[in-house]
Image (cartoon, grey):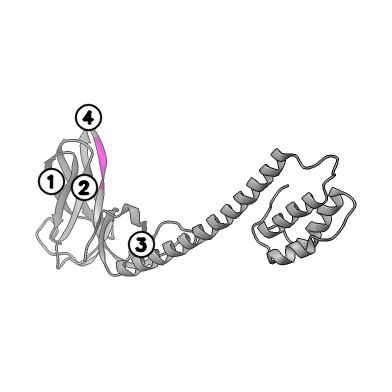
């Protein structure tokens, strides 16, 4: 006996009443019970019980139901009821998770975050704080800052650095000491490892303009002002 669904619109009394239909063989009895309990619908736990009762009523007295098979069918009925309860529980958890995501999203809009990236929207009247991910101890690290026209406006020499996140600060001025215009700038960090030039990851500040909530339980995506989207898990720091 197989179960293909966990829904049925019949009460237990209706099932037992409908199962009183008399047939001449076990097969005919089960067929009648199935039609009576479900019509064109799939079987639920109540219809399953009706089929089980009808099977017992219409069994051959000379070849009664095997005890092992009967116990197996009872176990199947118990499993079906457990799956129904589990489905309800999981649905409740999913609903709570979506509500939690919405609350989390509302608290992030307008906040400043630091995340991996090579561009930042810079207000040059203020200092910009970023970090460079250094994979191993090196003798020198350089951060090059390029404007929207591709012109290098500043190169910051961080000197020797140990493995980890190395902080740097840009005061908004070019190499000549003149404050440049506010806008979007690109940042590239590099070093030399085993006599080879290596590009390094930079973590830069950005402002969260909006948040995209997945409808399928996926991760929150932060939409950064002027910079595109990034997954919440990639954010290094969340500020004010």
Instruction: Report the residue that reaches farthest toward the front.
Output: 61
As drawn, is 79 to the left or to the right of 159?
A: right
Q: Nearer the viewer, residue 22 or 208?
A: 22
Residues shaded magenta: 197-201
Q: Is residue 14 above or below residue 55?
A: below
Query: Is residue 5 at all visible to an observer of this figure?
Result: yes
Q: Earlier in the sequence, mark 1 or mark 4?
A: 1
Q: Nearer the viewer, residue 181 or 226?
A: 226
Closer to us: mark 4 or mark 2?
Answer: 2
Q: Quadrant of residue 14?
A: bottom right
User: Is the residue under label 4 in contact with that under label 3 (CB below 8 Å)?
Assistant: no
Label 1, label 4: how far apart the Cα atoms are: 19 Å
For label 1, the residue is 158
Q: Earlier in the sequence, mark 4 or mark 2?
A: 2
The disc at residue 222 is 3
For label 2, the residue is 132
As drawn, is 216 to the left or to the right of 125?
A: right
Q: Nearer the viewer, residue 24 or 172?
A: 24
Residue occupying the point 62% across, 52% down:
80
Give the SS element for disc 2: strand
Q: Earlier in the sequence, mark 3 or mark 4?
A: 4
The disc at residue 107 is none
For label 4, the residue is 194
Label 4, label 2: how far apart the Cα atoms are: 19 Å
Q: Position of residue 87 (x, y in %)?
A: 55, 57
Label 3, label 2: how far apart the Cα atoms are: 21 Å
């Amino acid at each position: 006996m197989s179960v293909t669904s966990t829904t049925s619109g019949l009460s237990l009394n209706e099932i037992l009443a409908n199962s009183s239909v008399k047939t001449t063989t076990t097969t005919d009895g089960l067929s009648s019970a199935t039609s009576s309990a479900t019509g064109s619908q799939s079987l639920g736990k109540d219809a399953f019980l009706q089929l089980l009762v009808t099977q017992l009523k219409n069994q051959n007295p000379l070849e009664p139901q095997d005890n092992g098979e009967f116990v197996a069918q009872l176990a199947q009925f118990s499993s079906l009821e457990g799956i129904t309860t589990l489905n309800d529980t999981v649905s409740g958890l999913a609903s709570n998770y979506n509500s939690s995501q919405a609350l989390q999203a509302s608290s992030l809009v307008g906040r400043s975050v630091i995340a991996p990236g090579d561009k930042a929207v810079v207000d040059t009247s203020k200092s910009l704080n970023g970090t460079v991910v250094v994979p191993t101890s090196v003798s020198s690290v350089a951060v090059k800052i390029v404007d929207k026209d591709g012109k290098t406006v500043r190169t910051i020499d961080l000197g020797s650095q140990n493995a980890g996140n190395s902080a740097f600060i840009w005061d908004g001025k070019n190499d000549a000491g003149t404050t440049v215009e506010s806008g979007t700038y690109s940042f590239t960090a590099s070093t030399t490892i085993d006599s080879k030039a290596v590009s390094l990851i930079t973590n830069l500040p950005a402002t969260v303009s909006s948040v995209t909530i997945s409808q399928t339980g996926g991760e929150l995506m932060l939409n950064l002002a002027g910079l595109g989207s990034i997954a919440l898990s990639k954010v290094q720091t969340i500020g004010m």
